Image: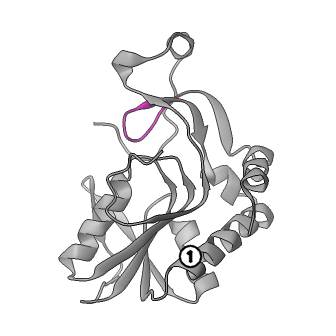
Amino acid sequence: MLSYNDSLKILKETNALLEGHFILSSGLHSSQYVQCAQLLSKPFKSAEFCKSLADKINNEIKHIDLILSPAMGGIVIGYEIGRLLKKETIFSERVNGKFELRRDFKIKKNQKILIVEDVITTGKSSLECSSLVKNAEAEVVAYACLIDRSNGKSQLDKKIISQIEINIPTYTKDNLPKELNSIPAVKPGSRELK
């Protein structure tokens, strides 16, 4: 498995760890942003990340029937983890701002579901996916992500298994530090702000 320092090195080498002033999909502001698309655009590097995460999942979860990922960020990671764990993998998509299963994807009653995404900050996308699981009368066994930047503050009700945990402070719009106030904000995420 990759160490913390090896994981951080890969993030920096692939330009996946960005510096500046960012508005996250949660609406919070940050001086750093993890752009997993940059990591995933280099399969020879992201393969190491995903293999290490799959090993961690195998060590911690004994039974998984299905992997569910939120579109867009979780699709590639979900696919790769599913390939490595030899599990069926589906994804949810936003329809009118709300996650739904499309493309004839189904969650069966009593299935054990692993929710996989790229980055967990507040856990909002994972929570939305877990609602789909609960509505199907199935069970979320855990959440997995390449990068956990929740700093223990997510609202997720199950364990988060991540390749790396990064503590990146976040701020509300009304409580920005001086250094962020002087930099124009950029919204790099895929979810529309409310």
According to the image, label 1 marks what residue? 57
Which residue is drawn at the image coordinates 51% and 67% (left, top)? 75
Q: Point out the image quarter for the C terminus.
A: top left
Nearer to me, 77 or 100: 77
Q: Is residue 17 magenta?
A: no
Q: In which image quadrant can residue 47 be found?
A: bottom right
Left or right position of 59 against 4: left
Which residue is drawn at the image coordinates 41% and 41% (left, top)? 25
Nearer to me, 27 or 144: 144
Image vertical order of residue 51 relative to residue 66, above or below? above
Point out the stretch of residues depicted in magenta: 22-29
Q: Please state which amino acid type lies under the numbered disc 1.
A: Ile
Image vertical order of residue 66 relative to residue 180, above or below? below
Task: Please state the horizontal and vertical placement of residue 160, each as a whole percent of the image.
Answer: 46, 63
Task: Please state the horizontal and vertical placement of residue 87, each as a whole percent of the image.
Answer: 52, 88
Left or right position of 12 against 153: right
